[in-house]
């Protein structure tokens, strides 16, 4: 089984933009070039297994999420 | 005239003191022996201290190895991440008796998935919304 982790600034639909994050102990950064959508990722055979809301705000524009995809 | 007498007395006193401070060959040998013994003692103490420290480190490593072995033998594992933002983010096991992070258990989600584990539960524990503060407790499970 494989895993991919994405981040979204505002995950409100399958077409919301999601990004991979460059891992760094100092300061992780969004990889702009990795921009995609849940719809695209699902079409490649991945399954959305976990979506974790990471911010406290309840505003749609602050619906930050960590999205975990799995594939057999 | 007085000056000459003072100088003469001064020279006499100087030589007397010098003679008094001069050690005999036996005294020099004894002093040298004493210094050597002290050096030996310091060396022995340092060796003893070093050995003690090495034993402490060895015991600590054995303890860590046993703890890690016990935790790794389980098909249910709980990991902590200071910043879980990708499949290669560092994950650490937690010592449940102390709630301490086990630094030597460092791994990542990608490696665990390769071992057959998958995430069954994930909780964000930090309240900050900054990527570098995405503290998570993640439960992995492997089906037999």
Image (cartoon, helix red, strand yellow):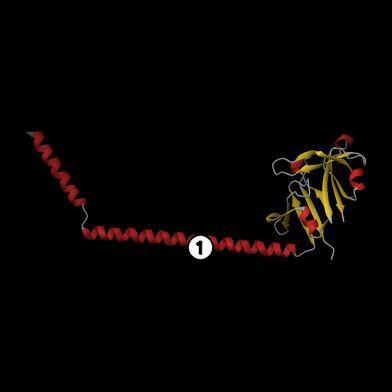
Above or below for B112 versus B66: above
Above or below for B87 versus A55: below
* Residue nearer the viewer, A16 or B105: A16
Snapshot quadrant of residue B31 = bottom left
Q: Where is residue A50 in the image (x, y as percent from the top left)?
A: 87, 49
Q: Where is residue B36 in the image (x, y as percent from the top left)?
A: 34, 60
Q: Position of residue B119 (x, y in %)?
A: 83, 55
Above or below for B5 versus B23: above
Residue denoted by label 1: B51
The N terminus of chain B, quarter of image: top left
Which residue does the image show at 60% across and 64% down from the upper left? B59
* Residue nearer the viewer, B117 or B34: B117
Which residue does the image show at 19% across and 48% down from the upper left? B18
Residue A38 falls left or right of residue B80? right
Above or below for A46 versus B4: below
* Residue nearer the viewer, A34 or B19: A34
- Pointer 1 local density, CA inside 10 Å: few below 14, some 14–19, many at least 20: few
Which residue does the image show at 74% across and 62% down from the upper left? B72
- Extreme residue in the left direction: B1
Snapshot quadrant of residue A25 = top right
Local SS, label 1: helix
Q: Which chain carries label 1?
A: B
Q: Where is residue A61 in the image (x, y as percent from the top left)?
A: 87, 34
The C terminus of chain B, quarter of image: bottom right
Snapshot quadrant of residue B127 = top right
Residue B124 falls left or right of residue B99? right
């Amino acid at each position: 089984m494989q895993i991919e982790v994405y981040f979204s600034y505002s995950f409100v639909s399958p077409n919301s933009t999601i990004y991979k994050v460059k891992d760094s102990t100092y300061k992780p950064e969004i990889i702009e070039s990795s921009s995609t959508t849940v719809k695209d990722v699902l079409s490649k055979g991945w399954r959305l297994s976990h979506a974790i809301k990471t911010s406290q705000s309840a505003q749609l524009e602050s619906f930050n999420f960590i999205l975990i995809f799995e594939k057999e | 005239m007085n000056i000459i007498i003072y100088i003469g007395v001064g020279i006499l006193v100087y030589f007397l003191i010098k003679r008094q401070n001069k050690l005999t060959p036996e005294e020099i040998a004894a002093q040298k022996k004493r210094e050597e013994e002290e050096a030996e003692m310091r060396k022995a103490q340092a060796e003893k201290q070093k050995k003690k420290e090495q034993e402490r480190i060895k015991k600590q490593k054995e303890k860590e190895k046993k703890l890690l072995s016990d935790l790794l033998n389980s098909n249910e594992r709980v990991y902590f991440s200071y910043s879980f933002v990708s499949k290669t983010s560092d994950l650490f096991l937690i010592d449940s008796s102390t709630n301490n992070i086990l630094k030597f258990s460092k791994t990542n989600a990608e490696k665990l998935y390769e071992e057959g584990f998958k995430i069954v539960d994930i909780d964000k524990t930090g309240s900050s919304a900054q990527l570098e503060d995405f503290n998570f407790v993640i439960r992995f499970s492997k089906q037999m």
